[in-house]
Amino acid sequence: MAGLVPPGATAVPADVTHTAHTKHDEKTDYMNLPCPIPYEELHREALMSLKPETFEGLRFDFTKGLNQKFSLSHSVSMGPTEIPSQSAETIKIPTSHYEFGANFIDPNLMLIGRVLTDGRLNARVKWDLTDNLTVKANAQLTNEPHMSHGMFNFDYKGKDFRSQFQIGNGALFGANYIQSVTPNLSLGGEVFWAGQHRKSGIGYAARYETDKMVATGQVANTGIVALSYVQKVSDKVSLATDFMYNYLSRDGTASVGYDYILRQCRLRGKIDSNGCTTSYLEERLNMGLNFILSAEIDHLKKDYKFGFGLTVG
């Protein structure tokens, strides 16, 4: 066997050759990077854990599907509403609302409308013109002067980038762009101009994502610095933290939270640096029947909010 190897030559071990091939195969292909998430959803994993839709009082939601695309919804809420006050204590007045909604959902078109007993009308439209171009519109009409508003978004999805152009009432214009620079890292920026208030802004963002974690950073010349981090402990458990700071007013808030998905329920909660604690529980009682518990405690402001609800459909 020794005669098979020429004199002066050294045989290369098989494991070294395999390692070299593996490193070559893992080389980043910058021409086939993944498409990043939309710029406006940079912190979506952290928001799921740290910003649940808490409420106070009673809430009942019922949705009835008329066919595969069209459905009607009814929502009743009863609970106190906070009113502005110059004192440190929170002032609340009892209120109740009924909301009627109509939904049309198609693979390429989504229409959602809501009307409330206080006269407010909300409408949302999402239309996929092509596989890459989407038009979205949001509008709210109220009886109060200067409180109605509308917004149009034009979203373009590229192979490894996303861009968006926004136009709204009050001479509001905005644009953002996000680009994948590696398989895990995305960088982006945004600009806006509010003509009615004569204000403009520019911001930058970065997002790093793996199978186990998501880290996001965002900064703007309006003074906002937003940092968030989400650790995926398992398929059912996630831990999240964020830090919000305004370097103009020097105000900062940090919070930590969790998102725990059980077989029949989902539990989310957080606690922030101001001492405010939040918990939100969604329990599936049966197919199409969910029970909701919501709690938010702020000992410094002596503000305590508890709510329970039922969702059918």
Image (cartoon, rainbow, N blue to C red):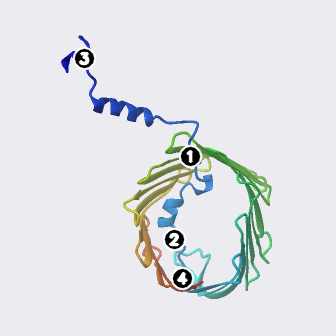
The residue that label 4 is drawn on is 56
Dot 2: within a 10 Å radius of its alpha carbon, few (fewer than 14), some, or many (20 or more) residues? some
Q: Residue at x 46, y 53 (%)?
A: 214
On-image quarter of the N terminus:
top left
Closer to viewer: mark 3 or mark 4: 3
Return the disc, 3 or 1, that comes first in the chain's sequence: 3
Q: Which mark is residue 5?
A: 3
Report the number of discs.
4
Closer to viewer: mark 4 or mark 2: 2
Left or right: 36 as drawn, with respect to 8: right
Amino acid type of disc 2? Answer: Pro
Q: Are marks 3 and 1 in contact (CB under 8 Å)?
A: no
Q: Nearer the viewer, residue 96 or 291?
A: 291
Return the disc, 2 or 3, that comes first in the chain's sequence: 3
Residues under labels 4 and 1: Cα distance?
41 Å
Amino acid type of disc 3? Answer: Val
Residues under labels 2 and 1: Cα distance?
29 Å
Return the disc, 2 or 1, that comes first in the chain's sequence: 1
